[in-house]
Image: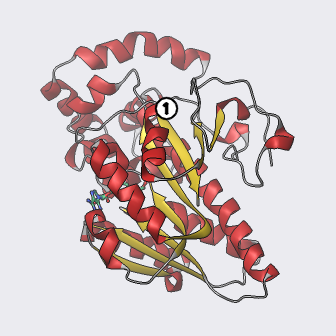
């Protein structure tokens, strides 16, 4: 369960408030961890800065941060299809898909110039790599948690479906991939997923991906707002709730309200999986791409949201590029 090399980024909050909340804590002892810790992705599978990348970034990141917005946008739009999608659709599921799917093709598949530009936008800039790291971590947590919940159902002799809610789920790529993984391992237990997003085109994208992956029978897509969580599902409970790519845009009162709604929608023994951006070196650049304003939260501030919402058992990890904090909060 505990994978060496990643565990220095795992931090556990249980009950009482932590005094320091430093990111680089000494690794907790494996035997004291719960059954499904957050550090679940094998070390080599997450993207990091190589020595060469670190050197290139010494010059390029400060430059990106000072260049004027029109120059940044023109460079991105003219040089790369993926970068132009990010500029045109910042903050949307479509922009994320452009970054998630970098490895679905070879680097130079769109020609040499495009390949050079993509090697910069995808592999020197931290944001796309950090997003892919976040996707992998969330997917692995979903898989571990879903497996645990299925085992618990089977232990009780219950054929009740495991129910997952994705709030602002966009394409739901993480959940689609999780179900594909579980099916490849012989999953038999019923699984039901509800994805809520305010953007119908994001839901259409997700429905197409689920169809292509052969898992669309598990999904129900709802065009709606996260504000309505408290009243969208009267009498219904979920085992897992994913909130990834939304809290970053919500003020503290709105984020706490949403987490309270999520807590009320959770079954006992269920969990919320959520993420938030951390203050990082590329913040001025990101804003100049046209991406909507985000609220950068330290892990300590992020975890405080869960405490205020009434969660008392929260763990988190910071992905290796230090851009996203991923938390799992259990009921
Ligand atoms: C950055 S994307 C994240 C998508 C997906 N969760 C992921 O991690 O790949 C943000 C998504 O949140 C949706 N969204 C933003 N505000 C929302 C709200 N108030 N209610 C529902 N969806 C919202 C957007 O339409 C978009 O699809």
Ligand 1 within 8 Å, label 1 CB: no
What sort of colour scheme is used for the picture?
A: secondary structure
Task: Give the residue furthest to the left.
Answer: 70
Q: Looking at the picture, how far across and down is residue 24, in whole percent? A: 63, 23
Task: Give the residue furthest to the right.
Answer: 31
Task: Give the residue furthest to the front.
Answer: 16
Q: Residue at x 53, y 50 (%)?
A: 135
Name the foreground residue: 217 vs 193: 193
Q: Measured along the vertical axis of the image, is residue 208 above or below residue 170?
A: below
Q: Looking at the picture, how far across and down is residue 19, in whole percent? A: 58, 25
Q: Residue at x 40, y 70 (%)?
A: 206
Q: Quadrant of ligand 1?
A: bottom left
Q: Residues within 10 Å of mark 1 (few under 14, many from 20)?
A: some
Q: Looking at the picture, how far across and down is residue 131, in whole percent? A: 47, 43
Q: Looking at the picture, how far across and down is residue 245, in whole percent? A: 38, 50
Q: Quarter of the image containing the C terminus?
A: bottom right
Q: Residue at x 64, y 32 (%)?
A: 9
- Residue on which disc 1 sits: 300
Q: Determine whether the residue tagged by mark 1 lies in a helix, strand or loop.
A: helix
Q: Residue at x 49, y 32 (%)?
A: 300
The answer to whether residue 8 is left or right of residue 237 is right
Q: Measured along the vertical axis of the image, is residue 162 above or below residue 52?
A: below
The answer to whether residue 73 is left or right of residue 319 is left
Q: Is residue 172 visible?
A: no
Q: Measured along the vertical axis of the image, is residue 67 above or below residue 102?
A: above
Q: Is residue 48 visible?
A: yes
Name the foreground residue: 78 vs 211: 211
Snapshot quadrant of residue 276: top left
Count of numbered circles on the image: 1
Snapshot quadrant of residue 159: bottom right
């Amino acid at each position: 369960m505990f994978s060496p090399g990643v565990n220095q980024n795992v931090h556990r909050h249980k009950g009482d408030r932590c005094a320091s909340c430093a990111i680089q804590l000494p690794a907790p002892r494996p035997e004291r961890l719960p059954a499904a810790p957050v550090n679940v992705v094998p070390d080599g599978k997450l993207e990091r800065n190589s020595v060469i990348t670190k050197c290139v970034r010494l010059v390029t990141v400060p430059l990106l941060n000072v260049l004027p917005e029109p120059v940044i946008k023109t460079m991105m739009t003219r040089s790369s299809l993926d970068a132009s999608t990010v500029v045109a659709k910042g903050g949307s599921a479509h922009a994320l898909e452009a970054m998630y799917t970098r490895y679905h093709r070879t680097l130079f598949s769109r020609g040499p110039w495009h390949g050079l530009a993509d090697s910069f936008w995808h592999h020197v800039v931290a944001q796309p790599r950090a997003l892919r790291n976040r996707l992998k971590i969330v997917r692995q947590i979903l898989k571990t948690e879903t497996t645990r919940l299925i085992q618990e159902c089977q232990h009780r002799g219950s054929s009740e479906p495991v129910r997952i809610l994705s709030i602002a789920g966009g394409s739901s790529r993480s959940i689609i991939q999780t179900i594909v993984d579980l099916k490849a391992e012989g999953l038999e237990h019923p699984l039901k997923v509800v994805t809520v997003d305010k953007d119908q085109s994001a839901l259409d994208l997700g429905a197409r991906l689920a169809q292509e992956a052969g898992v669309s029978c598990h999904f129900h897509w709802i065009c709606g707002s996260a504000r309505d969580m408290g009243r969208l599902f009267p009498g219904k409970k979920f085992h897992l709730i994913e909130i990834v790519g939304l809290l970053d845009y919500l003020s503290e009162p709105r984020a706490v309200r949403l987490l309270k709604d999520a807590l009320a929608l959770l079954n006992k023994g269920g969990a919320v999986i959520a993420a938030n951006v951390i203050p990082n070196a590329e913040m001025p650049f990101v804003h100049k791409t046209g991406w909507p304003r985000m609220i950068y939260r330290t892990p300590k501030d992020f975890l405080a949201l869960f405490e205020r919402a009434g969660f008392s058992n929260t763990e988190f990890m910071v992905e290796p590029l230090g851009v996203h904090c991923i938390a799992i909060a259990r009921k």
